[in-house]
Amino acid sequence: MATEEQKYFERLNIPVLSIESIKELIQEDIVDTINCWNNGIDMEKQCFHIIGPAGVGKTSICDQIRRNLVEILNKPVEMIMVKSPVLSRDDIMIPFPVVGDGLKTFEMLYSDFVPKGEDTYGLFVIDECSRGDHSLQQLFWQVQNECKIHLKEFPKGWFIITTDNPDDSEYQMDTMEDAAGLRRQLHMYTEVSTKDFLNYANINNFHPLIIEFISTNPDMLYDFGAQKIGSVFANPASWEKVSNHLRKMDIEGKSEFTNSQYRRLESLAGGLVNVNVANLLIEFAKEGKDINPKDIFYNLPKIRTQIKTLIHNHDNAGISKIMTGFVNYLTGTIPAYEKTGKELSYVGEFLAMVPLDASAIFVTSIDTLSRDSKEFRYMTQMHVELMKQPAYKANFYEAIVKLGNK
């Protein structure tokens, strides 16, 4: 087991990537491999191993990759996902006695979990691979290394992805980490990303309350404290379930819930993200006391007094929380704006009024973005337009540069 001083990805010495980066990396590698085949190059397939906290989106991203490959390849792409904790070796294959020419022999019978069809394409996903029993893991080792089970080779167009939770104190694992096991796969660790969650939430039409709550309270996306003590804990997967319940309750798109609906939500959300977090969500929905990052962009006058009060009271923690949420909102939703519209003027005014400590969060958050990402291009283009505002240039940009030079 990993020690408290060293995280699992540190022990394995593997890269830490966002879930979106992992998705792009895997699907691009699959497409590149198939392109090699189409050009007469017999390129070996890569097996990928995605490691990350429970509920971060490891399994759902596999289906996103499958759907993207359908569009990119313009071919049907299947997916078989096997759940290691609930399977045994006999669920995959069993020997069957055969009598022929006076001899008794055995043939292997393969289950529906084994992909068939020579000209098919697909993903074979082994979910929670290290939580299967030892004999099943040994069987899947051959899948990872040779793309076959016993003598049954997988169709050439099938690729292998395995997922795991980290081998930390919060999870019960049976990790096989000898050199032979580690060499079979390309290992990647993913951490919780508010930006990726909000992007996914907007694409998949999450209920607005969830998007606004997480934008305003990014620390509520994953409740590591509750997880450590064995409590029900908030995570991206559970927030998606809460969103589904909200959409069912709000099928007519009403702006407010009734008291009976709030009581129902308290029970539903309480069982998914825990009672404490559910109560925070309901309080947010009822009172809206927290500053919504969306209002900074679209309706700054509505919350200007609240922000100035925080600044006057030197509430640096509150201001930093707002700034973090605002950056997550911008990079997660990429809201449209007119170059001469009120949205840019609100953004410029907000950044110019906050203390430099909070301004630095805005700058450093952008600096973490990939230079070729749409989020980085969006933020860079916004900065170019904001530089036309004297207050932004003097009170934000030049002040940050001066601070950096010190």
Image (cartoon, helix red, strand yellow):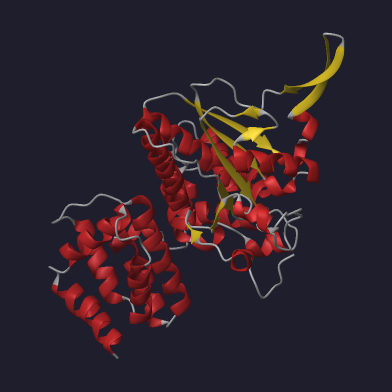
Is residue 262 visible to the viewer in this orientation of the structure?
A: no
Horizontal and vertical percent position of residue 182:
63, 55
Horizontal and vertical percent position of residue 143:
64, 38
Q: In the figure, residue 200 lies in which quadrant?
A: top left
| Residue 393 to residue 130: above or below | below
Residue found farthest to the bottom: 406
Image label count = 0
The C terminus - image quarter: bottom left
Left/right placement of residue 326 relative to residue 213 reads left
| Residue 298 to residue 110: above or below | below
Is residue 349 visible to the viewer in this orientation of the structure?
A: yes
Horizontal and vertical percent position of residue 73:
37, 30
Residue in the image at 59% along x and 68% along y: 10
Q: In the figure, residue 291 lies in which quadrant?
A: bottom left
Residue in the image at 64% along x and 62% along y: 224
The N terminus - image quarter: bottom right
Left/right placement of residue 317 relative to residue 101 reads left
- In this view of the protein, which residue sits in the foreground, 272 or 43? 43
Q: In the figure, residue 138 lies in which quadrant?
A: top right
- In this view of the protein, which residue sits in the foreground, 165 or 260? 165
Residue in the image at 80% along x and 30% along y: 90
Horizontal and vertical percent position of residue 249:
55, 35
- In this view of the protein, which residue sits in the foreground, 51 or 351? 51
Left/right placement of residue 209 relative to residue 293 reads right
- In this view of the protein, which residue sits in the foreground, 363 or 177? 177
Residue in the image at 20% along x and 57% along y: 342
